[in-house]
Amino acid sequence: GGAALTSAAPTITVTPGPRSLAQSSVAIRVPSLASGDTATITVTARDAFGNLVGVGGATVEVGLGSGTSAGDIGPVGDAGDGTYRALFTATLAGTARTIVATIDGDTITSPAPTVTVTPGALSLAQTTVTVGTATLASGAATTLTLTARDAAGNAIGAGGATVLFTKGAGT
């Protein structure tokens, strides 16, 4: 039984609150990369309710935490909207490694993503052959060992390639 208001409805503007390190996040689009590949790391600043902070200007640093995979992290770019991006270039294969970040010197406390670097494509320039015994008596045998490596020197652990050893020059 009431009457409708005839005055204009009020305007309410909701703005994000202060940055929350627990709600802010670090992400990497591809969690497993071959050596030499790249992926973008994104840092997103959010308030306590998960709202994007909406402005840039913070000092953001990205680094690698625990684990043995390695790579290079390029400079952090500011998108001006509360998101920051850096390019990760995978180098050395290893175990899953956490990616950590700080905003204005404060560490983001939300769960850290991981990245795992695997060996890249075979590089003949990095692949080595070793000989068990370099000098042999006639009729004796030795072992030749081929260690396949990628361009960064990571040993390629998977077998299955056909390897042919041939006798070169010498006596």
Image (cartoon, grey):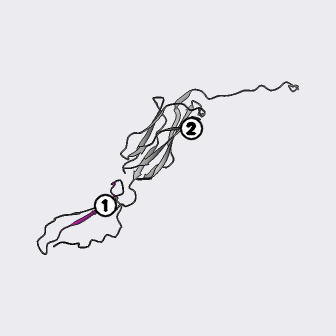
> At x 47% / y 42%, what residue is drawn?
113
Q: Secondary structure at mark 2?
A: loop
> At x 67% / y 28%, what residue is drawn?
14
Establish if 134 lies above or below 110: below
Residue at mark 1: 127
93 or 134: which is nearer to us? 134
Quadrant of the frame with the N terminus: top right
Q: Residues within 10 Å of mark 1 (few under 14, many from 20)?
A: some
The residue sitting at the front extreme is 169
Residue 138 location, quadrant: bottom left
Q: Main secondary structure of the magenta part?
A: loop
Amino acid tagged 1: Thr
> At x 27% / y 71%, what residue is drawn?
165
Q: Give the alpha-carbon distance from disc 2 to disc 1, as whole Å.
A: 42 Å
The residue sitting at the bottom extreme is 139
141 or 84: which is nearer to us? 84
Q: Secondary structure at mark 1?
A: loop
Amino acid tagged 2: Ala
| Residue range corresponding to the magenta coloring | 140-155
Dot label at residue 67 = none
The picture places residue 147, in percent across and down from the top left corner, at: 29, 61
Horizontally, residue 144 falls left or right of residue 150, namely: left
Residue at mark 2: 79
